[in-house]
Image (tube, grey):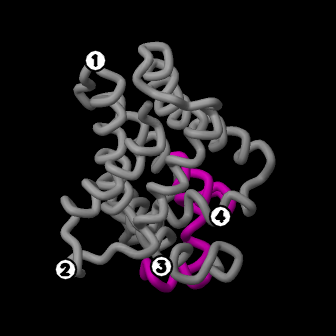
Amino acid sequence: MARTQGSHSDITGPRIRRESLRLFAQHGFAAVSMRQIAKEVGVQAGALYNYIPDKQSLLFHLMEAHMEELLATWRAEELPDSPLERLRKFVGFHIRFHLGRPDEVFIAYMELRNLSPENFRTIEALRKQYEDALEDILRRGVEAGQFAVPDTKIATLAVIAMLNGVNTWYRSGGRLSLDEVETIYWDMVRKAVII
């Protein structure tokens, strides 16, 4: 990879990703130009191509990195044996992980339409792995006689959609603490699936 004079790939590459993430979340992928990204990073527009092939690749790599971090972090969690306790763990994990990454979450859900078909398939496969983790919890709960869920796939999508909603309204220092929000959401999820 060619380097621009005075630049350092280990510094500039992460800066490109960080500034692109911020700009895409703030203005939308389609509205952000490579020239804007270059300006925020402090390099000439042409220099960006020393680090990334194009804007589509940049969007894809931001989404892929987010999904891979989400999956790796979830897989590293110590999970209890009980489906009910595992579901509780998932609810808390999902809320806290996503609140810590608002720009990544916004892009991961709102910019799917801007991915090429091949990149879309890759991101969808990663999303399905995460959905499958929740569906497995629900399925185990049904098999154990703990949950009354007529369709675990629909329940999975509904729970994730509900949990994602926290990112749209929760603000630190607001009326409810994060612990209170997590408790309320856990109570809603539990009541939706429990016998």
The mark nearer the N terminus, 4 or 3, is 3
**As drawn, is 178 to the left or to the right of 186?**
left
Q: Position of residue 34 (x, y in %)?
A: 62, 76
Q: CA distance from mark 4 to mark 2?
A: 29 Å
Residue at the farthest front position: 195
The residue sitting at 61% across, 82% down in the picture is: 35
* Snapshot quadrant of residue 89: top left
Mark on residue 183? none
Classify mark 4: helix, strand or loop.
loop
The residue sitting at 36% across, 71% down in the picture is: 6
Image vertical order of residue 21 relative to residue 79, above or below = below
Which residue is under mark 2? 173
Q: Nearer the viewer, mark 4 or mark 3?
A: 4
Classify mark 1: helix, strand or loop.
loop
Which residue is under mark 4? 111
Image vertical order of residue 97 relative to residue 105, above or below = above
Q: Nearer the viewer, mark 1 or mark 2?
A: 1
The magenta segment is 35-64
Mark on residue 81? 1
Classify mark 3: helix, strand or loop.
loop
The mark nearer the N terminus, 1 or 2, is 1
**Badge 3 local density, few (<14 within 10 Å), some, or many (20+)?**
some
Q: Nearer the viewer, residue 175 or 65?
A: 175
Q: CA distance from mark 4 to mark 1?
A: 36 Å
Q: CA distance from mark 4 to mark 3?
A: 25 Å
The residue sitting at 56% across, 57% down in the picture is: 108
Q: Nearer the viewer, residue 50 or 193?
A: 193
Q: Is residue 71 magenta?
A: no
Q: Nearer the viewer, mark 4 or mark 1?
A: 1
Q: Are marks 4 and 1 in contact (CB under 8 Å)?
A: no
